Amino acid sequence: MIEELYQKNLMRLAANATGSQKLENPHFTETLDNPTCGDRITLQVKLEDGRITELSQDNRSCLLCQASASLLAENAVGLTAEDLHKVIAQIHKILNGEEEHAETPWEKLEYFTPVHAHKSRHLCVLLPFHALKKILQQESADAP
């Protein structure tokens, strides 16, 4: 069962560590923890006109959270809050087993399909997305 969860495509995604550099003068920084397993993710973001122009991620977390953060960093530039909500909705469908082999906004989201059977690991996958959602909500609240 654990072998099914840690597939090579997830291991490669985590190993890529896309976005692992720190940003100079980020507009927003958010750190979130997963109290159930000890994962910690810190995102730094630069925004322009409500769109992400740069994103970096630093995490001390499990392979699933690392893979998720790397995937987010691969696709973040250009995202708006609305775009992020669509992606999060799709991840929830994948984790809940609602859409197997469905079209996804990002092809690699399908890599997380095996996590469906491991409910205790869903937050590991979602943590980077929750951190970015929090940043975008903060940016929206700060906007004039």
Image (cartoon, rainbow, N blue to C red):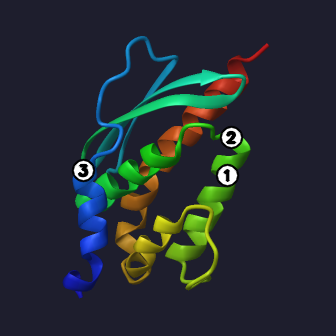
Mark 1 crowdedness (10 Å alpha carbons): few <14, some 14-19, many ≥20: few
| Residue drawn at 38 percent across, 81 percent down | 114
Earlier in the chain: of badge 3 and badge 1, it is: 3
Q: Position of residue 18 (x, y in %)?
A: 33, 44
Q: Quadrant of residue 42?
A: top left
12 shown above or below 80: below
Label 1 secondary element: helix
Q: Which residue is mark 1?
A: 85
Q: Quadrant of residue 143?
A: top right
Q: Quadrant of the N terminus?
A: bottom left
The reply to whether the C-beta atoms of the residues labelled 1 and 2 are less than 8 Å apart is yes
The reply to whether the C-beta atoms of the residues labelled 3 and 1 are less than 8 Å apart is no
Please, what is the three-letter code of the amino acid marked with disc 1?
His
| Residue drawn at 54 percent across, 83 percent down | 97
Q: CA distance from mark 3 to mark 1?
A: 23 Å
Q: Nearer the viewer, residue 76 or 34?
A: 76
Q: Which residue is mark 3?
A: 61
**Tag shown at residue 81:** 2
Please, what is the three-letter code of the amino acid marked with disc 2?
Ala
Q: Position of residue 62 (x, y in %)?
A: 23, 57
Q: Position of residue 7 (x, y in %)?
A: 26, 76
Q: CA distance from mark 3 to mark 2?
A: 25 Å
Q: CA distance from mark 1 to mark 2?
A: 6 Å
Please, what is the three-letter code of the amino acid marked with disc 3?
Ser
**Residue 111 visible at all:** yes
